[in-house]
Image (tube, coloured by chain):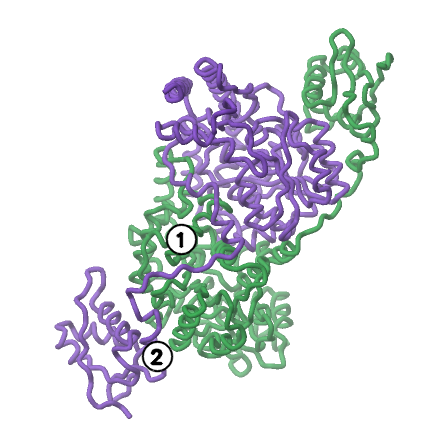
Chain colours: A purple, B green
Amino acid sequence: MRQAEHIELAIHPKPDHLTIHDWIYSEIRAAILSGRLKPDVRLPTTRDFALQNQVSRGSVVTAYEQLIAEGYLCSYTGRGTFVSKTLPHDLAVRPASRPSLSPKHGTLSRRGAMLAQSPFYQESRQTDPIPFRPNQPDVEHFPFNIWNRIASKRANALRDRNMGDLDPGGYLPLRESIAEHLKYAQRIQCTLEQVVILGSAQQALDLCTRLLLDVGDQVWMEDPGYPGANRIFAGNEAHVIPVAVDKAGMNVERAIEMAPHAKMAYITAAHQSPLGVTLSLERRLALLAWAEQNQATILEDDYDSEYRFDGIPLAPIKSLDSSGRVIYMGTFSKLLYPGIRLAYVVLPDWLTDPFLSAVSLTCRYLGLHPQMILSEFMAGGHYARHLRRMKMIYQERAQAFEYACREKLGGEFHVNPITTGLDACVFLPGELDDADVARQLSASGIEARPLSFYGIAKKPASGLVMGFAAFTPTAIAGGWEKIARILRQ
Amino acid sequence: MRQAEHIELAIHPKPDHLTIHDWIYSEIRAAILSGRLKPDVRLPTTRDFALQNQVSRGSVVTAYEQLIAEGYLCSYTGRGTFVSKTLPHDLAVRPASRPSLSPKHGTLSRRGAMLAQSPFYQESRQTDPIPFRPNQPDVEHFPFNIWNRIASKRANALRDRNMGDLDPGGYLPLRESIAEHLKYAQRIQCTLEQVVILGSAQQALDLCTRLLLDVGDQVWMEDPGYPGANRIFAGNEAHVIPVAVDKAGMNVERAIEMAPHAKMAYITAAHQSPLGVTLSLERRLALLAWAEQNQATILEDDYDSEYRFDGIPLAPIKSLDSSGRVIYMGTFSKLLYPGIRLAYVVLPDWLTDPFLSAVSLTCRYLGLHPQMILSEFMAGGHYARHLRRMKMIYQERAQAFEYACREKLGGEFHVNPITTGLDACVFLPGELDDADVARQLSASGIEARPLSFYGIAKKPASGLVMGFAAFTPTAIAGGWEKIARILRQ
């Protein structure tokens, strides 16, 4: 039975951000969802509703139509408009009907809880780099004029390009330029099909882990080692086997003793993160022999070896790999600028198809524009020129850093000769806690990352990882003066 | 004991792509790694080597220095250069020493084997869309002039921007524009902090799955349903519960019976993929009540509801969500053009921090440039204008599609009225196998995706999913004429 009396509906004042019909719609919907308007109740006619609330009838009609279309109301010709009777009668007891309810906390999965502990998340809130934030390239000397000229030209070229779905492997000419560059600069022989462009080194780590490791599978990692990799392994529930690092890099013999059947070895062979040592040739060969014998994969993360100051960069493990055991990964974030969002992997042939499939499933493909710009930048010789130029600038800054550190705190602090990259590892007197020191410096406007941040199973020696590449020699000298002052207080 | 006799080393002819010193380096290295040059053997002097091979002595010196730096050779003043004696003596038996060895196949992880079955991978090799490829927006009418003008302006602005690390949540003004747009267009009330920009809907699906589901956790999915979601769940080893779809969308009552404790429901409520139906209000409310009671999450994938032709789009489930149970996801790939690579999620408050952390760990952050362009494109009103314009164009094409289908094959094929989006679902006579028909059409240059491609547990009715949005009415009519001809043969 229909209720003969229509109701007079009290509604709240209109908020500024809503149109009149959206306001009426929201008020009626809220009244239904909160149980104030029960199923089968008749609503005022649009004319009465408009008069009661002093709005135009058209707005009321629009709101009613919306609510009818969504199933809240039903209209019967000649009888009027009713709250839908198919709606549940117990709407009022549903939590959704209490708008004051504070959002409940949901539950993360086990792996979700690990993914929620990114080492990059807090950092991402930072602003411009201040001395001595690590992992920062200099962007002042980046040839923006050239880059922007190419970018503008390519922006206008978008129309002629296929704006439809693209190749998950990346822009072919860029893959070719990278393959070509690796041949000369790193002695890696690879085809362009083996090169896959990604948005970041983290994406490369994540995809390799998921493709090759199941939950509980073992992976060797240098200890201390790169937290970005450690967290990716944890987020994928792989079992990290921390392996000590000495002057010749990861102790491969020890790793074979500890976990001979690991599925993967993650290694920063050229410039160990964070200690800066290089993996010896003997260990490279031992690592490769182990991987071949065990069908394991070596994930060689070469994040900054192009910036090697003593003239002769060692050939990567990948250049020795004739049996498809090594994945080589590089990034342009550190070589050009972080915001570029381009990285790549060089894959063994057998992994290419599964990898491209995984890219297409988890991200489809990357946008074309930055890839086109970088490709043209490389083809025009600007890339090689920029690397040469920055190598000289970074070398000068590395020397300024070593000099200032020794001059100001040479008795207490120890810095190894800096041979590669953007960062230095500075060792502190054993009695100083590096996290304490970093906090103390941070309070006075100096950034440095404690070595303990990189420790996995073992607490590393007390030390600080400090970036020098993004700072002028003057800023570097000033920074060390400040550090000396802070520590002497 | 040093071997007094130095050897005379036979080397292969120089390949064109190598410099002379790289060639010498490679030949000596290969001879060492293959065991032809044993540890502790003395090499010719650089002078003799240069004479023997008719190259400049400088090139030989460079090659020797590289090999010494890498640890293959040792040099003792006054005694000459020797193969390093710390190298393993059994190098020759290592597979790496046999360059003819074909690359071995490695083993994918269980989840890797699933990631290797992307529904997008084969498709990605396709070229320009031909009728009736599904999921293709029209790109001919895209306002490239405006887009390119903004892109050029922004390209030149790069220099002034922070090129360092960016926010994992995306470009703030874009997040704000999206929050604002959703308020008006979808009745979703959210703050800009709840909006996170991603590179694709697949990335959104992947991150939500990993954050909320562990291996073996249950997730409801429409059957037939979107393979891109189904494969993401499989690739993360979640347990998909296929739920039948009828005229009112996913059968929520049935889902509750089958798997009341599922952790997630993935749903295309506005426009079910692939059948095109809309989830009824009763079921929306039942779904929400279930999610609230069970602390489950609803993943509402709204991929094309902005293109609704009958005037009144239904408000998304998210607009009813006052207790933080719904994640709403949208993409610009279908609304603007696929190559844009921008999508977004609207998160409940409790999930925002873990989600941003997971983004920063697995991809760091997106590039700024496309986000800046889209943000300005939206702020300038071009976005809303483009959607309005395309809605009219698509509606005309939908009508042309329905008309041509009925005219040519009305007796045999059945197409429901097209209310939303870019694709239609066409039902075939029961005795025709849809995969067979699709293959037959494909051989004659017509694309269509069999409905069976979307089936999970149950074989769906025989049908074809066909895109109409990217094709002119003339092309649509021509396409149907061709189909009729093919099928009559």
A239 to A332, vertically: above or below = below
What secondary structure is marked by label 2? loop
Residue farthest to the front?
Answer: A431
Q: Nearer the viewer, residue A230 or B163?
A: A230
Residue B213 place in picture, x, y as percent = 52, 60
Q: From this viewpoint, is residue B113 visible?
A: yes
Tell me: A28 left or right of A69.
Answer: left
Q: Nearer the viewer, residue B205 or A373?
A: B205
Place residue B343 in its image quadrant: bottom left
B382 to B303, vertically: above or below = above
Residue indicated by mark 2: A90
What is the chain letter for disc 1? B
A369 to A394, vertically: above or below = below
Rendered-image quadrant of the N terminus of chain B: top right
Q: Amino acid at mark 1?
A: Thr
Residue indicated by mark 1: B352
Q: From this viewpoint, is residue A177 visible?
A: no
Q: Residue at x 39, y 29 (%)?
A: A440
